[in-house]
Every structure is written in structure tokens, then in C-alpha cells.
């Protein structure tokens, strides 16, 4: 565990890890396994790694296919590739009925098409796994990069694996697992359970592959990395790339004495705040909690916050703030409340606050996040609400601070609902379980509690 | 659980009776269903104890294992069950219709006309609850690989000839039951739960008698009180007045009724064996009579615990038949008929039994099929049933309203202008209608049927309660929309924000092309069942 020693500077540790990964990907030794796996904690430079790997593979004379999971991820990746690697010719393969947005078209080295034949000569072809599954290519690629590979389902990999010989799988094992709405118990315990994650299946069939990992989170501040690492990655710890004094959040407007402002100041100083409403069982779209979330966001904008970091100084504008929820109807309710409060939420009409569910916030990064706790106001703690990945995504999107809004009583709720999922033969027990992770995070948040009456 | 189901459950708590969740029946019911009520013996997973079955509610037939630990008796029982059930399952195989289709010639690539047989009807098994389905699956798994005297190497304990065939049918039916919306094998608690809400928990709803108690509580009792009585009322000997619907039996029945009856059977058979060994013909004759009496006594006690559930299942069928069938039932039942026909053909072709475990490709194909069928079921139920659509409307995924205005407009970017009219409707629904989001118009058969008509949200005015949509398709190829292709002011229309057609699943490789990420092609032949040494009798 040399890379974890505190002697080595974070930058050097990360560089060493990246160098090992690139060597294994671009110049695999004879007889090396066909896959390289990289486990990346939140904000550890996964996207940068993908760009570098693509450049080096193309530099070594290879053509390359890249598989991402959603159209948003593909567009982000194409934009970054086009910007950071202008020498590459990039093909963006899209579905016939969904042409990518105008941001993708502005790059001269990007070609769009819904037919793979138009793009095969390009250095890099990028598309979603859903689109790749339909591709019938005569000459498969030698190399592939699979991005957000832990979000990809095993059956999707089964359908696309014929297209490449070797692959670099990059992803965050702590995020949400893929899911399905139908019963899959009959395949539980099979190494190729079609509903499990692509990486889990691939590793089960290729046990000689030793996953690499990125040891430093560049996104999470020094106030968040230790908690996230301890709660969600206990066996593969990581640290923040910045120190406690590298990130600062300051307000131009003095606090007005309200609980909201107290929570904002607490979060600015400590990186975390828990804005706690009185205990109560509520409907999913708890009107008071939704109002508290919206009011917090509005105050964040009104108080003219400035975010200072190693990247410089910038005002905290609406597009640097995100609200995370567990359910879509909660996101819709928060969006409606923000509209009423005069806060922009429509990305098409200029800088706007992002309001979305944990599933859709995966892989995104903001300066400040406001999170409606998945267990707030609930009478029970189901497997959905206890899922480790859901809380991990919500609590690890921020560069500066995270404000959690919740009803009191979550600790008691957790104690009343220990996880009772049946144990399936052959399915490795995952640690930490959501119950334990929830308790850890809650325990830490309680130190930064502001009560809202 | 959707908000509407939660409301229905709350209403059931208040009214003390089951409340409707559907206005139509969403599952096919056969004219001649086979009701099967299985019981298991405690102590060994999947050990059959008895089964009551039949297509006539007045003539149930009972099969039982007098000593459930005895493997020979268990296979005698399974042979009886096969002799009873297989004729029913096979009775649908003869009556077929010819379905015309086309097939590509693999060499010339030309399409040729082909006819395929499709069975005109298919069997339907109804069990009391989900545990009953799982029990049948276990029976299927434990019997379909058994060898019989007809095999080359029958082994020391050949099974009766038709038992493996029964196992293959049970495996097919229980596997098909995993596909959403299918009706070859249904559980009564599942059927009732889809159509009515009770005021008790989902766990309590698994108890068939307790569930039914909410439908017709005795005079003076609420549903909750009647359900509690059904669950726990006992007679003066400590036996439940209404035995559970199985397959597990009540432990007090096991202890005080079943175990003594089995012990008497054991004693009688031991006496019989002793008599035969001692060549004491008179004693053997007495013991034979005692065995017959013991079996008769077991029949009586098992009939007594099975009959209430038998009647409950038929009562549930009566309740379901009061609902008119949903519009898409015939279409989904055709899928079940294809499934039945396919299994019939595989048996006729002499294919080996279904493998113990699916290979990677088969598992992925089945998952894709189930997800596709779940999506199709959700759409079809919403189209068939205003109450199901109301659930989507309440969740903000659909909206209904009266058209107030239709303004012609055109897309002139192409060579010839295309109609892109704006339809405004007034609605009290609050959909998650972001601008530009795709919407789909629900059209009845008369209005062009289920063919999709796409639109996008063009304007939303929550204060005024209006939504404006730009219609994008389904208006013909001319400059002006085809007559009747658009709603008119005053019409009641419904749009959904989810697609009304189900997307195809992406192609998967053949099992022989399973890639390295999934372990490569599966081993050639299925491994024969390992001979686990177990006590046979």
C-alpha cells in the first residue's frame, strides 16, 4: 500500500497509479489478461485517465471504441476528448432518434452519425452501451474503454464484448448498482447473473485480473474525503488531493440569524451541515422539507458566496449548485418550489441549478450540493432507501460543501430497520452495507446539526 | 407502491372491505382452469405431502404420500400426479391453427411463405399463492432429470416413466410464470392483489383466506376482524378453523393430527412386513387392512385441511370473473399459447430437459424478455383500464383533458411543408411536463388504434391549467393533416409521457459465441445430476 503512505504527495501518488494503469493498457505484457480494471473513488480523475488512455492508445497506432452508459456521459466525454486531444478524430455514434445537442457539434474534430460505417475510420468512436449493442461491425476494434463500468449491466457487456479484444474498464464501485424492475432471484449466485454489474461478472470469469485504483480524490475537499472513504470504501481508502485550507467558501452577505443561514455558514466552515426538521412521518414529497431545500438554495444564491480553490476564485452561481433526491417526484417538487422562489432550474435558458435523482447525478460535480436525505420522513427503511450507492452519490458530488436536509429521527429509524435482505448462496456479501454506511454518515452529520423549527 | 394503491389501501382500512384497484380483469382466465393446491411435509425442502387438484370445483382429487420421508412412496405419488395432470396439459396439444409467416431462406436470402402451428388454447394452472408456484418449481427441478426404466442406464432407483415429463412441464410453467403478464400458471393471492386492495400489509395478503375475508366479511365484522379470525381462530382441539393455504402446514396440525396418523401408518406397514417375513398370513392380512385404514385416515385429515383452500381458490375465481376482461388479454394469451406450443414442439423433437442453470446468454435473453414484457404489461394495463391510467396521471406521467383549441402550424424546414399543429387542452392533472418533452397520444381503436401519435410539450400554464402540445406524427403524408387524425375542440384526450410501444431488445450472441468476459461458450453437454448419497426409504 505504498501509494497510501502520507510521505508521498497526493499528486505523485496519483501519477504513479496512472502510469501503472497506462502501461498495463497500452503495452500489456505477453500473456496479460484481456481486461484492465480501474476502481476510482468520486472525483479521482477518472475522466482525465480516460482521455489520456485514449490519446496514448491512438498514439500507439490503435483505433479505439469507447462505451459509456448514458447520452449525457457520452456527450461529456466527447466534449472533453475534443478539447484535450484536438489531434484525434472522434466519431460520435448516436441513436437514429436522438441527435446530440449543439455543444457536441462545435468541435471540428467530432463527426456525428447514426451509422457505424461512417465512423469506423476515426481514431476514437464513442457511444452508449445501448447503441453499441446494435452495432454489427465486420472488423471489431482491438481496444475498448468502458467508462462508468460499474453502472453497466452484465447483459449489456455480453452484447458488446464481441466488438473488442481488450478493454480498460473504469468506474466507481461505490456508486449505484445497475437495477432491473423484474425478478432475477433465479440467477442470484451465478457468476454471469445478467442483472449484476459488468465488472463483477468480468472479474468473476477472469480472476487473474487485479483491479487498479486511483488513490486521490481531486473533487472532494479535505472535510469530505475521510468520511466518504471510511463510510463507503473501508477496504480501499483514498484521500483528498487538497488540504484543509485549499478550499474556502465565503459569503458577501452577513447571516440574518435564521437557521438556513446558520446551516450555510456551518457548511462553509466545516464542509457539512445537517438542516434538521422536526420528526414526522410524511409523504415522499414532504412539502416542508422541499420548501427548506428550496429556501436554502435561494439563500445560497442571495448571499453572494465566493468559492476559492486551487483552481482560482469564482462566484457561486446557480450552475455550480445541485440538489439531489432519491425519487423523481421529489426532484420535480423541488424544481417547482425553486421556480416559485425565482431560482432558475432550466439549463436551456442559462445557468441554472441542477435538480435530479442520485441515479442521474452520478459522475457529476458541483461546488455546493443540497441533499434531501433518502430516509427523511419515512416510516420504514427499504432496501432501495438503504442502498449504499444512493447515499454515496448524494454525499460525494461537491467540491466545497454539502447541506443535508432531513427530518429528525433517522437514527431511530435505522435502528428499527436492520437490513433483512435474504442471503443468496454464491453472492458475495458486500461491505459496507447501506445500514452501516448510513449510520456513519449520520453520525458525522449530527456534529453539524442546525435545527429548523 | 403507487400513491393510488396507497389511497385504495387507506380506503379499505376505513371501509373495512377490499377496494377495487382495477375496473377490468388484467389476467386471462381459462374456461377450464386446473386448480392445484399442494402441501409439503415439514423438515425437508420441497418434500411433497399431498395435492388436491381438478378442473371441477365439485370433484377435487387428492393424491398423498403416506410417509413423506419414503422416496419410493414419493415417486408413487409423483407418478399418480403425472397420470392426473399430464392428460390435462396434453389435451391442448391437438387442436391447432395454422399461422402464416415468412422465413428467409438461409442460402438464397429469398423470403418464403411458411405455416407454423399454434395451439388454439393452452392449459392454465391456478395455485393458492406464490409459495405454491415455488413448490411446483422445486418439484420440477427434482424430477426432470430423473432416469426411468426407458433410459439406457436407469440406475438403482428408476423413477416412474412419466415423472420426468411432469418435471419438464412444471419447469416450463413455473419459468413462464416469471414473465410479467403471463397466465399459464397464476397464484390466486397474486391475482387478487392486482385487482383489489385490502387494509392489511402485503405480508398478510399472502394468506389467501385472510385476503378473501376482506372481500366478504361476515355480518357485523370488519375486514380486519374477519381476516384475523381466518388467520388464528382455532377449535377446541387447538386446530385452525381455516387451515393455511399451504404449501406449509400448521405446526399444530403436524404435531397433533398428521404425525399420529403417519405413525399409525408406519406401525401398520411394520406389522405387515413382520407378518410377511414370519409367513404369518393371518397377521399379514390384518396388517394390510390396518395399512388401508391408516391411509384412509390420512386421506380424511388431509382432505379436511385442503378443502377450505380448494373452495377459497374457486371463490377467488368467481370474484375475478365478475370483472370484464381487459382489451389486451387476448393478445397476451396468444403469447402464452406460443409458449405452450413451443414446449410441446421441444418435447416432440426429443430435446433434453431444461438445463439445471441457464447459461449466460439464455439468462440475459430471459431477463430481456421479462423486462420487455413488464414494459408491455404496464402500457397495456394503462390503456385497458382508466384506473391504471389514473395511477400514471397521479404520478405525473400522463394527463387527460378537454381540447380547447387546435391551431394549424407547419414545419417548413424541409422540401415540402409538414403539418405540426398545436393542440391545447385544459387539465387539472399536474404532469412532469418539461418543455420539449415527448408525449404520446392515447387513441382508441376507432381513432386509429394503438399506432403511436407523437407530440412534444410546447407550452405549460399551471395557473390557467392548460398544456399545449405540438403534434409531430400520425397525420398522414400530405400538407394538411388527414381528416380525423387530430382531436377537435371539446374532445377528451389523454397523453402519456412514456412510450406506448415497447422497444425491441438488442441482439445477443449465440451461446456458442459467449465472449471471454462471460466465461466463453458453456460446456457442451449438460452435466448429469451428481449421485448424492441419501437414504432412499
Image (tube, coloured by chain):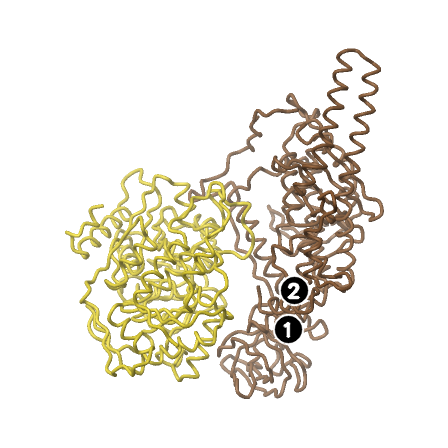
Chain colours: A yellow, B brown
User: Is A435 situated above or below B86?
Assistant: below
Instruction: Name the quadrant containing residue A335.
Output: bottom left
Marking on residue B442? 1
User: Is A311 situated above or below B157?
Assistant: below
Question: Which one is nearer the viewer's eye here, A309 or A93?
Answer: A309
Q: Is residue A398 left or right of residue B343?
A: left
Image quadrant where one finds the C terminus of chain B: top right
Q: Residue B420: image x %, image y %?
A: 56, 81
Image point (83%, 19%), residue name: B285
Q: Residue furthest left?
A: A7
- Name the chain letter of the residue that bears numbered label 2: B
Residue receiving disc 2: B380
Marking on residue B269? none
Image point (21%, 50%), residue name: A4
Q: Residue furthest front?
A: B236
| SS type, badge 1 | strand
Q: Residue A331: image x %, image y %?
A: 45, 72
Question: Which one is nearer the viewer's eye here, A412 or A59?
Answer: A412
Q: Residue furthest top?
A: B279
Instruction: Name the quadrant containing residue B290.
Output: top right
Q: Residue A83: image x %, image y %?
A: 28, 67
Neighbour class for label 2 at 10 Å: few (<14), some, many (≥20)?
many
Question: Which one is nearer the viewer's eye here, A43 or A55?
Answer: A43
Are the residues flagged by discs 1 and 2 in contact, CB closer than 8 Å?
A: no
- Name the chain letter of the residue that bears numbered label 1: B
Instruction: Name the quadrant containing residue B321.
Output: bottom right
Residue A66 visible at all: no
Question: Distance between the Cα atoms at labels 1 and 2?
Answer: 11 Å
Image quadrant where one finds the N terminus of chain B: bottom right
Q: Residue B347: image x %, image y %?
A: 69, 38
| SS type, badge 2 | helix
Amino acid at each position: 500500500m505504498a501509494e497510501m503512505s502520507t510521505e508521498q504527495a497526493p499528486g505523485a501518488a496519483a501519477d504513479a497509479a496512472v502510469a501503472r494503469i497506462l502501461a498495463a493498457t497500452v503495452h500489456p505484457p505477453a500473456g496479460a489478461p484481456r481486461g484492465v480494471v480501474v476502481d476510482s473513488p468520486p472525483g479521482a480523475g477518472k475522466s482525465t485517465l480516460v482521455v489520456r488512455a485514449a490519446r496514448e492508445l491512438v498514439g500507439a497506432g490503435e483505433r479505439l471504441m469507447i462505451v459509456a452508459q448514458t447520452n449525457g456521459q457520452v456527450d461529456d466525454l466527447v466534449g472533453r476528448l475534443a478539447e484535450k486531444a484536438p489531434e484525434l478524430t472522434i466519431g460520435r455514434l448516436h441513436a437514429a432518434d436522438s441527435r446530440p445537442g449543439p455543444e457536441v457539434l462545435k468541435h471540428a474534430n467530432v463527426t456525428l452519425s447514426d451509422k457505424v460505417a461512417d465512423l469506423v475510420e476515426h481514431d476514437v468512436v464513442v457511444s452508449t452501451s445501448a447503441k453499441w449493442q446494435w452495432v454489427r461491425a465486420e472488423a471489431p476494434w482491438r481496444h475498448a474503454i468502458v467508462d462508468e463500468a460499474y453502472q453497466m449491466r452484465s447483459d449489456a457487456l455480453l452484447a458488446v464484448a464481441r466488438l473488442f479484444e481488450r478493454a480498460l474498464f473504469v468506474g466507481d464501485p461505490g456508486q449505484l448498482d445497475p437495477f432491473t424492475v423484474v425478478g432475477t432471484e433465479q440467477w442470484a449466485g451465478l457468476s454471469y447473473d445478467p442483472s449484476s454489474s459488468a465488472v463483477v461478472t468480468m472479474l468473476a470469469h477472469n480472476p487473474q485480473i487485479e483491479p487498479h485504483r486511483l488513490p486521490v480524490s481531486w473533487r472532494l475537499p479535505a472535510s469530505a474525503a475521510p468520511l466518504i472513504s471510511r463510510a463507503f470504501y473501508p477496504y480501499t481508502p483514498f484521500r483528498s488531493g487538497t488540504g484543509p485550507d485549499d478550499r474556502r467558501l465565503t459569503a458577501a452577505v452577513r447571516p440574518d440569524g435564521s437557521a438556513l443561514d446558520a446551516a450555510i455558514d456551518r457548511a462553509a466552515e466545516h464542509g457539512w451541515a445537517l438542516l434538521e426538521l422536526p420528526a414526522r412521518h410524511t409523504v415522499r414529497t414532504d412539502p416542508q422539507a422541499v420548501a427548506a431545500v428550496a429556501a436554502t438554495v435561494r439563500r445560497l444564491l442571495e448571499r453572494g458566496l465566493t468559492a476559492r480553490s486551487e483552481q482560482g476564485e469564482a462566484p457561486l452561481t446557480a450552475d455550480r449548485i445541485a440538489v439531489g433526491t432519491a425519487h423523481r417526484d421529489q426532484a420535480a417538487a423541488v424544481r417547482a418550489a425553486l421556480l416559485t422562489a425565482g431560482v432558475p432550474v432550466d439549463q436551456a435558458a442559462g445557468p441554472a441549478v441542477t435538480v435530479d435523482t442520485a441515479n442521474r447525478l452520478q459522475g457529476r460535480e458541483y461546488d455546493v450540493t443540497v441533499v434531501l436525505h433518502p430516509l427523511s420522513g419515512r416510516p420504514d427503511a427499504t432496501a432501495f432507501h438503504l442502498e449504499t450507492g444512493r447515499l454515496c452519490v448524494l454525499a460525494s458530488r461537491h467540491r466545497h460543501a454539502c447541506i443535508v436536509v432531513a427530518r429528525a429521527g433517522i437514527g431511530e429509524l435505522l435502528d428499527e430497520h436492520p437490513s433483512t435482505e435474504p442471503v443468496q448462496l454464491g453472492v458475495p456479501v458486500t461491505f459496507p452495507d447501506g445500514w452501516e454506511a448510513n449510520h456513519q454518515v449520520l453520525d458525522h452529520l449530527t456534529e453539524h446539526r442546525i435545527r429548523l423549527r | 407502491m403507487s400513491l393510488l394503491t396507497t389511497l385504495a389501501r387507506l380506503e379499505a382500512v376505513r371501509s373495512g372491505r377490499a377496494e377495487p384497484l382495477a375496473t377490468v380483469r388484467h389476467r386471462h382466465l381459462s374456461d377450464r382452469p386446473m386448480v392445484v393446491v399442494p402441501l409439503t411435509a415439514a423438515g425437508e425442502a420441497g418434500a411433497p405431502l399431498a395435492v388436491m387438484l381438478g378442473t371441477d370445483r365439485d370433484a377435487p382429487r387428492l393424491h398423498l404420500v403416506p410417509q413423506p420421508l419414503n422416496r419410493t412412496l414419493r415417486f408413487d405419488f409423483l407418478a399418480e400426479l403425472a397420470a392426473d395432470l399430464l392428460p390435462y396439459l396434453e389435451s391442448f396439444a391437438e387442436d391447432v391453427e395454422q399461422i402464416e409467416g415468412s422465413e428467409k431462406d438461409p442460402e438464397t436470402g429469398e423470403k418464403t411463405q411458411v405455416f407454423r402451428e399454434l395451439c388454439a388454447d393452452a392449459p392454465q394452472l391456478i395455485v393458492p399463492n406464490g409459495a405454491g408456484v415455488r413448490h411446483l418449481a422445486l418439484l420440477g427441478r427434482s424430477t426432470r432429470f430423473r432416469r426411468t426404466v426407458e433410459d439406457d442406464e436407469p440406475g438403482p432407483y428408476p423413477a416412474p416413466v412419466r415423472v420426468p415429463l411432469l418435471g419438464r412441464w412444471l419447469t416450463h410453467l413455473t419459468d413462464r410464470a416469471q414473465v410479467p403478464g403471463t397466465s399459464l400458471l397464476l397464484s390466486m393471492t397474486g391475482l387478487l392483489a392486482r385487482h383489489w386492495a385490502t387494509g392489511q400489509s402485503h405480508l398478510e395478503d399472502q394468506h389467501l383466506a385472510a385476503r378473501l375475508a376482506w372481500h366478504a366479511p361476515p355480518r357485523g365484522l370488519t375486514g380486519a376482524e374477519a381476516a384475523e379470525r381466518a388467520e388464528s381462530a382455532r377449535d377446541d382441539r387447538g386446530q385452525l378453523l381455516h387451515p393455511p393455504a399451504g404449501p406449509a402446514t400448521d405446526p399444530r396440525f403436524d404435531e397433533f393430527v398428521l404425525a399420529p396418523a403417519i405413525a399409525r401408518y408406519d406401525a401398520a406397514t411394520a406389522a405387515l412386513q413382520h407378518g410377511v417375513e414370519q409367513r404369518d398370513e393371518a397377521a399379514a392380512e390384518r396388517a394390510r387392512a390396518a395399512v388401508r385404514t391408516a391411509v384412509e385416515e390420512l386421506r380424511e385429515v388431509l382432505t379436511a385441511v385442503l378443502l377450505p383452500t380448494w373452495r377459497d381458490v374457486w371463490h377467488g375465481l368467481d370474484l375475478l370473473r365478475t370483472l370484464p376482461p381487459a382489451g389486451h388479454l387476448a393478445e397476451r394469451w396468444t403469447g402464452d399459447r406460443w409458449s405452450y406450443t413451443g414446449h410441446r414442439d421441444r418435447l416432440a423433437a426429443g430435446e433434453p430437459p431444461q438445463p439445471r442453470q441457464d447459461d449466460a446468454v439464455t439468462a440475459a435473453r430471459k431477463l430481456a424478455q421479462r423486462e420487455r414484457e413488464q414494459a408491455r404489461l404496464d402500457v397495456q394495463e394503462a390503456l385497458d383500464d382508466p384506473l391504471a391510467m389514473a395511477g400514471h396521471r397521479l404520478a405525473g406521467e400522463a394527463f387527460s383533458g378537454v381540447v380547447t383549441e387546435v391551431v394549424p402550424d407547419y414545419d417548413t424546414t424541409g422540401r415540402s411543408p409538414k403539418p405540426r399543429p398545436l393542440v391545447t387542452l385544459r387539465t387539472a392533472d399536474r404532469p412532469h411536463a418539461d418543455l420539449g418533452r415527448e408525449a404520446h397520444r392515447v387513441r382508441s381503436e376507432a381513432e386509429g388504434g394503438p399506432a403511436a401519435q407523437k407530440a412534444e410539450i410546447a407550452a405549460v400554464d399551471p395557473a390557467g391549467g392548460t398544456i399545449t402540445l405540438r403534434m409531430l406524427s400520425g397525420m398522414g403524408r400530405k400538407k394538411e393533416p388527414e381528416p380525423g387524425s387530430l382531436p377537435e375542440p371539446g374532445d377528451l384526450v389523454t397523453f402519456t409521457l412514456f412510450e406506448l410501444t415497447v422497444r425491441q431488445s438488442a441482439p445477443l450472441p449465440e451461446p456458442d459465441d459467449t465472449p471471454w468476459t462471460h466465461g466463453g461458450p458453456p460446456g457442451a453437454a449438460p452435466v448429469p445430476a451428481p449421485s448424492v448419497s441419501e437414504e432412499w426409504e
